[in-house]
Image (cartoon, rainbow, N blue to C red):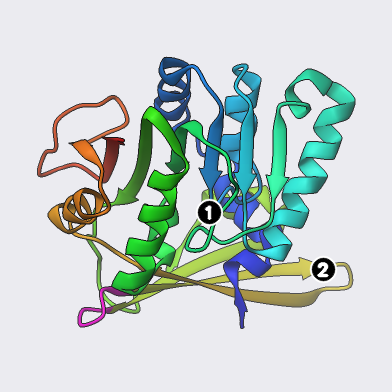
Amino acid sequence: MNDLYDAPWLYDLQHDGYRDDLAFYRRLAEDQAGPVLELGAGTGRVTIALAAAGLPVVALEPNDAMRGRAAERFAALADTRPDVAARIRLVAGDARTLALGERFALVLAAFNTLMHLERVDEQDAALARARDHLAPGGAFACDVFVPRFGHDGLLRAEPAWAQLAGPDADLFVWQHHDLVRQLVLSHHRLDQVEPGGVLRRRRATLRQRYYQRYELERALRTAGFSDVRCYGDFERGPVRATSTVWAFVARR
């Protein structure tokens, strides 16, 4: 069974159309009015949106397959929007050990990027490196989902995503939740009927270490950030019982 990030085509199938966070990060980048460092850039969804808004972006991605897919997208973009593509620099690297020797007005970890850091020492190292790469007055921003889970192992169909995969396709997702380690494993199965009536089944798993709100706020303060703010949506509204995302902004 593959890691979801080793199957960027499946990742993009599910997430490339996600737009909820783009205005939030674009506004932050424009307010900071400087270069952006994006941690865990994936296949470039947020990267392209920020570059299209006129911001230079260094896109850091550790996974070879995801970075390869991003490189393909950026190369295609150079044919249609060379001005946008010119603002993007794709870098292989790990947020925990990053040492670019550069400073940025904004460092961001969008779309649950920090949830791939399972151990406390990994989280501390990544946040410390993020702070090291901020210019004076710079901002760090991230978002994580609010940890609410349904019945463990319950199989659910995802018809909207399946339609994107083409006719005769079915996409199923189920999760296993480890309360002790604060881990959730999301299993993805895509079934497609190929010419000749042959069923092709592909699987991938996403492993995420979730946070509680004050746990992450404390981690940011421990890393040396100040003015740590947590919002309950991407419009910078207050945290509510019904919030599905926590969006953080902190300052150096």
The residue at which mark 2 appears reads as: 194
Dot 1 and dot 2 residues touching (CB under 8 Å): no
Which residue is more in the foreground, 103 or 94? 103
Viewport quadrant of the C terminus: top left
Residue 46, numbered label = none
Tell me if residue 200 can be seen: yes
Which is more toward the observer, 155 or 58?
58
In this view of the protein, can residue 155 be seen by the observer? no
Horizontal side of residue 55 vs 135, given as left or right: right
Up-down: is 187 above or below 42? Answer: below
Seen at 88% across and 67% down, the residue is 195
Q: Residues within 10 Å of mark 2 (few under 14, many from 20)?
A: few
Indicate whether 182 appears above or below 159.
below
Q: Is residue 229 above or below residue 50?
A: below
Residue situated furthest left in the rendering: 241
Q: Amino acid at mark 1?
A: Pro
Q: Residue at x 83, y 22 (%)?
A: 82
Quadrant (top left/top right/bottom left/bottom right) for the N terminus? bottom right
Q: Is residue 21 left or right of residue 100?
A: left
Q: Position of residue 18 (x, y in %)?
A: 51, 39
Residue 220 coordinates in the image, percent (x, y): 25, 50
Tell me the CA gap for discs 1 and 2. Answer: 18 Å
Q: Along the horizontal axis of the image, is 32 left or right of 202? A: left
Which segment did they paint magenta? 178-183
User: Which residue in the protein does label 1 denote?
Assistant: 159
Q: The residue under label 2 is which amino acid type?
A: Glu
What residue lies at 64% left-to-right and 42% top-to-bottom? 44
Q: Secondary structure at mark 2?
A: strand
Quadrant location of residue 92? bottom right
Q: Is residue 186 left or right of residue 70?
A: left
